[in-house]
Amino acid sequence: MKVGFIGLGIMGKPMAKNLLKERIELMVSDLNKDAVKELTELGAEEGSYQEIGENCDIVLTILPNGAIVQDVLFGENGVAWALSAGKLVCDMSSVTPGESKTCYTKLKEIGVGFVDAPVSGGEPGAIAGSLAIMCGGDETDFERLQPLFGILGNSSLLIGGSGSGSVTKLANQIIVNLGIATVSEALVLATKAGADPMKVYQAIRGGLAGSAVLDAKAPMMCARNFVPGGKISINHKDIKNVINTAHDLDVPLPLTAELFEIMQALKVSGHMDDDHAGIVQYFENLAGVEVKSDIRL
């Protein structure tokens, strides 16, 4: 089995490396030629979109947004023009359910399978091979991907038909990003009141307030570490997808709508390339205080 991998960014590069470690024959492509060189030095083969379509049985994509996915697959010299019946495309990007369904329908017309399989776990999960993979599509295609999913993640689940994985990722992003905003607000309050925010975190993490979000992001906030594992810009795009999808379905999302405006403010103030732990900076600015601690785990 030969696998094509398109998208070697923060998430894609470590995912591709994990596939290579397990001796998966890999052909890669990315606009960042340094990332491509890094992978080819580890044993991957570089290929154009058409070469990947022609030579690979399964094609994985993980790209910044749905428009780029559509262009890579269906644009001029895109992957789809070189695919033949029986091959399979799996998009692991965070896109809207409608965009996933469009890919499914177009590829189905030429006998090619499609699974939307966005992931959760951020860069640490991508490096560790411990991602949660949420899938939409046909069960037979999902089963074909299991050997790869077993390398990339700790869990993979077929939610339902095409678009279901993307819906699940939108729900995930609501919970994750509102959770980060909640942690931010709480630690700003604690800091303003004179408490060490790291001690506050350590005190509450074992109780009902404990969560994966709290454990991942509170120490980063306290250390002023906003080096991105998941950029605010990517999550800003995801929350915009949430809002647009909710509007299409007539689902009011008042808390998520406020979160989107918080991210808009962070965009204006130049924080889009920060890790989403940097959401805390919005609340710090309101309160005139900085969450900071010399204590480390």
Image (spheres, helix red, strand yellow):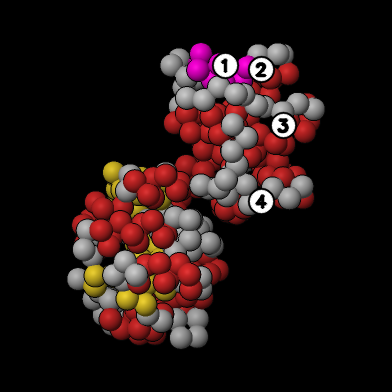
Query: Do the residues bearing badges 3 and 4 touch, measured as CB atoms within 8 Å?
Result: no
Which mark is drawn over residue 190? 2
216 left or right of 89? right
Q: Earlier in the sequence, mark 1 or mark 3?
A: 1
Q: Earlier in the sequence, mark 1 or mark 4?
A: 1
Q: Residues within 10 Å of mark 4 (few under 14, many from 20)?
A: many
CA distance separating discs 2 and 1: 7 Å
Residue 159 visible to an observer of this rendering: no
Element at badge 4?
Answer: loop
Q: Residues within 10 Å of mark 3 (few under 14, many from 20)?
A: many
The correct choice, above or below, for 136 with respect to 42 in the image is above
Which mark is drawn over residue 200? 1
Label 3, on which residue?
A: 283
Residue drawn at point x = 60 percent, y = 28 percent: 222
Verify whether residue 203 appears in magenta. Answer: yes
- Residue placed most toward the observer, 144 or 222: 222
Label 4, on which residue?
A: 272
Q: Amino acid at mark 1?
A: Val
Q: Earlier in the sequence, mark 3 or mark 4?
A: 4
Q: Earlier in the sequence, mark 2 or mark 4?
A: 2
Q: Amino acid at mark 2?
A: Ala
Q: Position of residue 232 (x, y in %)?
A: 61, 48
Residue drawn at point x = 38 percent, y = 56 percent: 14
